[in-house]
Image: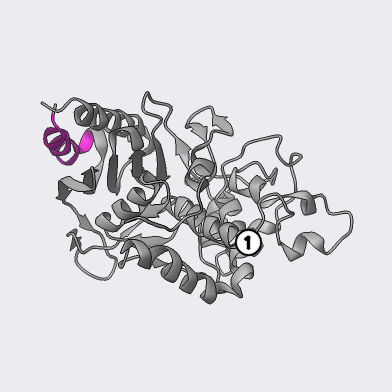
Amino acid sequence: MSVDALTDAMFEDVERFGETYAVVVVVGDEIVCERYGGALPHFDAPPEPVTPQTRLLSWSMAKSILHAAVGILVGDGRLELDAPADVPRWRERDDDPRAAITLEHLLTMRDGLDFVEDYVDDRVSDTIQMLFGDGKDDVAAYAASRPLLHEPDTHFNYSSGTSNIVAAVAARAVGGGDAFVSFMHERLFAPIGMQSAEPRQDAAGTFIGSSYVYATARDFARFGRLYLHDGAWDGTRVLPEGWVAHGRRVRSVDPEDGPYGAHWWVVGDEWDSFRAAGYEGQSILVCPPLDTVVVRLGRSDVTQYPALGTWRADVLAAVSSPG
């Protein structure tokens, strides 16, 4: 099946895939397929039809964008991966075991903090409490208040709270939350032409790096191309050499979601693909051997995720054997 036919199926088979807002497939820096559909619901206005200009929500794809920004700071020498993370709360007591958590532990989700990543049950979900409940005004403080459950680097626990701690650490390295957002625009978004990117902050000024970047589908594809080209753009290095490898190197394997690197998921296919992934089926799939980036944005139920995974694999198969 061709890429176009697979994209037709993605939009038409709502029962299998959920509602799809956008698909962009880039091969060799050329958009070979681009499609939009559906409408964004609003509580106080009619549904908004999705177009190429519509800014769509990243959800947890923001974590991979955060990885890029942190990489630039590491390259600048303003952050160190193996040094204790700059979280003042963890240094208030001499005996706080969380003081041993490094930035690398946080990026690889092996920090050991007790954080429940759940998107449905607000009775147990730290994610819901952090984003919409008691922690919403200062997401990093909420996450940093969690106790240590395991020794650092002994357990993998995918955690949106961890990403918000990273965002606050990065902000402190440049002088505050507003300064960090400006840094992202100047050093990451502008060099790759990602003009629509809009990172959102909480009331404390922290970039909500777990969940909130709005951008067009084409601009999410631009971000994917940055990682496709090993952190360089039009011959100019944006990310430090080796930083893409840092993100895609497997550190852990989640029983349900598979291999994980550092704020990037690793697909485990024959092409060593990796992807940014977000709630409701958002994804930026990066496949260097096929020189391909596949973006899919929409609203899918968790039961539809396996079908989305099969679809992404089918797209790569179509690219590898056109016709």
**Stretch in magenta:** 2-15
Task: State the quadrant of the N terminus.
Answer: top left
Q: Residue at x 37, y 64 (%)?
A: 191
In the image, what residue occupies the spot 59% across and 48% down?
107
Please say if 297 is above or below 6.
Answer: below
Residue 214 belongs to the span the image colors magenta: no
The residue identified by callout 1 is 77
Q: Is residue 9 magenta?
A: yes
Left or right of 31: which side holds 84?
A: right
| Magenta: main secondary structure | helix
Q: Secondary structure at mark 1?
A: loop
Q: Position of residue 25 (x, y in %)?
A: 22, 43
Report the front residue among 318 and 120. Answer: 318
Rendered location of residue 255, percent (x, y):
53, 27
The answer to which quarter of the image holds residue 213 is bottom left
The residue closer to the viewer here, 27 or 206, is 27
